[in-house]
């Protein structure tokens, strides 16, 4: 096994992570990995590709497979085999010298161009149910109470809250309030364990910037949050996925993935996972922490819907169970309150937060102190608790309506998750591709759902679709599920209808 070889400046690891459970041949994966590195400029003109032997050993494949990949790259005009210098890049990334783009920008642009979503309704087709959007519905936003909090803040403090806050980790009053509320998940947490960020997305970005370098590997679940895939690609990171199914997280595969030398981070959503709504129960969390004990890989657990529990009691975070002190929790107000605040936070020990705070300092100096102070006012006035009470009551009714409709409408062979909270559930059919086809056919009948392939690293055909309950009230849930039930029945009766997606 090749260890810690740095063939390419700026790329800690130039050996591709191969995915043996996809239809794409290994040689094509290897060629794709280097083609992407060349086109993005990470492997610049004149740079040498790693020797075939090193790639074969590092990726665990026969040399012939790597040779075939290098030949394919040569045929695309990207590299040339030279006597004495090995295989050399002969293509420049194409960025015009007048406007050079970073590898990050190239990858982000490419991802945005390619990013799939929910199929739109045909023009003129009336909407029956919208299960696509995960952003909370504007109708739920507590506009009056937010305005009152902002007015009260400005009346009391005036210009004093309009300058820089000089609190790079976040306003101490806000961190104290958040820590107090967070203790139902993580009993020992204090204000010092918190770093306030511009939403969960910035917290995820910070974790990657702090702990990973281009070419490193991040492990996540299959399926996983699609915007995280975009972020990982923009950072030039490789991704290894571990199945997260009705049986839980595949811990054997996880242990194998964590043992890979290039792995720098594990990202997962233990509660109300996006897109399936699944939650790791306490025994599953403990078993996961036992697997983690064998490694020094830091974990980022994304608790983006932490407060949206309608049933049962809050579960301890992985961070509170991980004796290594290597887990960070990410949280946000986007789903529990409203996303325009762009406020989130990280929970972690000083060893993890200190470098992250330094990285963040040069990104944005600090997260808006005005909005942080207004949130303090809002929470102290009891407005967040009142809002959450209303939200959870409505959410519980919507989940109940979804399960009732699923029982009444779905044909045998379909399954649906029944989460204890959060906005999402996952409807699954038996065969790969049927979820994507269901999304297409449902849109033609006025129902919007997100096809499962959106949440697959390689956009592979999926069995499932994500159903979000932010925009669907109990009446449209019943109507929408009746449509989904009919479409699913048609698909199961003539499986060939699903083939067009494969
Ligand atoms: C799993 C997950 N993490 C993070 C985010 C981003 O949240 P924020 O709006 O706080 O940046 C989302 C948004 O949908 C999400 O689904």
Image (cartoon, grey):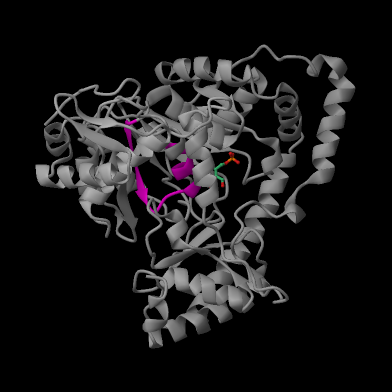
Quadrant housing residue 3: top left
Q: Is residue 501 above or below residue 460?
A: below
Q: In the rendered image, which quarter contains the N terminus? A: top left
Asked whether the viewer can see residue 184, the reply is no
Q: In the image as oriented, which residue stretches furthest toward the top?
A: 166
Query: Could you tell me residue 481's position as x and y percent?
Result: 56, 76
Q: Quadrant of ligand 1?
A: top right
Query: Could you tell me residue 212's position as x and y percent?
Result: 37, 27
Q: In the image as oriented, which residue stretches furthest toward the front?
A: 83
Residue occupying the point 55% across, 23% down: 195
The foreground one among 205 and 197 is 205
Query: Could you tell me residue 77's position as x and y percent?
Result: 32, 41
Q: In the image as oriented, which residue stretches furthest toward the bottom?
A: 493
Q: Is residue 274 above or below residue 292?
A: below
Q: In the rendered image, which quarter contains the C terminus? A: bottom left
**Relative to residue 428, is residue 141 drawn left or right?**
right
Query: Could you tell me residue 50's position as x and y percent?
Result: 21, 30
**Relative to residue 194, is residue 499 drawn left or right?**
left
- Magenta stretch contains residue 181: no
Residue occupying the point 63% across, 16% down: 365
Asked whether the viewer can see residue 307, the reply is yes
Residue occupying the point 39% across, 73% down: 429
**Relative to residue 116, is residue 38 drawn left or right?**
left
What span is colored magenta in the figure? 215-232
The foreground one among 16 and 67 is 67
């Amino acid at each position: 096994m090749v260890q810690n070889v740095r063939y390419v400046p700026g790329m800690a690891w130039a050996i591709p992570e191969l995915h043996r459970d996809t239809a794409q041949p290994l040689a094509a994966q290897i060629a794709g990995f280097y083609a992407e590195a060349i086109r993005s400029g990470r492997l610049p003109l004149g740079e040498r590709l790693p020797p075939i032997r090193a790639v074969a050993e590092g990726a665990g494949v026969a040399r012939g497979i790597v040779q075939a990949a290098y030949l394919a790259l040569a045929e695309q005009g990207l590299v040339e085999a030279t006597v004495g210098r090995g295989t050399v890049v002969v293509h420049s990334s194409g960025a015009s010298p007048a406007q050079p783009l970073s590898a990050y920008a190239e990858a982000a642009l490419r991802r945005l161009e390619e990013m799939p979503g929910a199929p739109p309704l045909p023009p003129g087709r009336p909407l029956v149910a919208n299960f696509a959007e995960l952003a909370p519905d504007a109708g739920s936003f507590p506009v009056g109470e937010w305005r009152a909090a902002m007015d009260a803040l400005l009346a009391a403090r005036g210009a004093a809250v309009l300058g820089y806050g000089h609190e790079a980790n976040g306003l101490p009053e806000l961190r104290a309030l958040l820590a107090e509320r967070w203790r139902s998940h993580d009993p020992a947490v204090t204000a010092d364990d918190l770093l306030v960020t511009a939403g969960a997305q910035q917290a995820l970005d910070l974790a990657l910037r702090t702990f990973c370098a281009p070419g490193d590997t991040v492990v996540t679940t299959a399926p996983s949050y699609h915007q995280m895939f975009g972020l990982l690609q923009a950072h030039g990171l490789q991704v290894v996925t571990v199945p997260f199914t009705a049986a839980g997280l595949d811990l054997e595969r996880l242990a194998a993935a964590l043992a890979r030398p290039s792995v720098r981070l594990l990202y997962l959503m233990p509660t109300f996972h996006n897109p399936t709504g699944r939650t790791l129960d306490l025994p599953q969390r403990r078993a996961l922490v036992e697997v983690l004990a064998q490694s020094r890989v830091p974990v980022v657990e994304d608790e983006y819907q932490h407060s949206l529990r309608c049933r049962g009691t809050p579960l301890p975070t992985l961070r509170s169970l991980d004796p290594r002190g290597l887990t960070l929790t990410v949280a946000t107000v986007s789903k529990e309150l409203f996303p325009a605040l762009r406020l989130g936070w990280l929970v972690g020990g000083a060893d993890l937060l200190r470098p992250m705070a330094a990285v963040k300092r040069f990104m944005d100096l600090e997260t808006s102190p005005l909005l942080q102070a207004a949130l303090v006012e809002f929470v102290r006035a009891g407005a967040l608790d009142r809002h959450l009470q209303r939200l959870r009551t409505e959410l519980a009714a919507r989940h109940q309506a979804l399960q009732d409709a699923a029982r009444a409408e779905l044909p045998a062979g379909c399954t649906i998750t029944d989460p204890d909270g959060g906005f999402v559930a996952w409807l699954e059919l038996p065969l790969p591709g049927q979820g994507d086809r269901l999304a297409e056919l449902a849109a033609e009948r006025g129902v919007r759902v997100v096809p499962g392939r959106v949440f697959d690293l390689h956009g592979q055909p999926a069995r499932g679709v994500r159903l979000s309950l932010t925009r669907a009230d109990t009446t449209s849930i019943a109507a929408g599920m009746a449509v989904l039930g009919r479409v699913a029945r048609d698909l199961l009766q003539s499986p060939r209808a699903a083939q067009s997606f494969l």
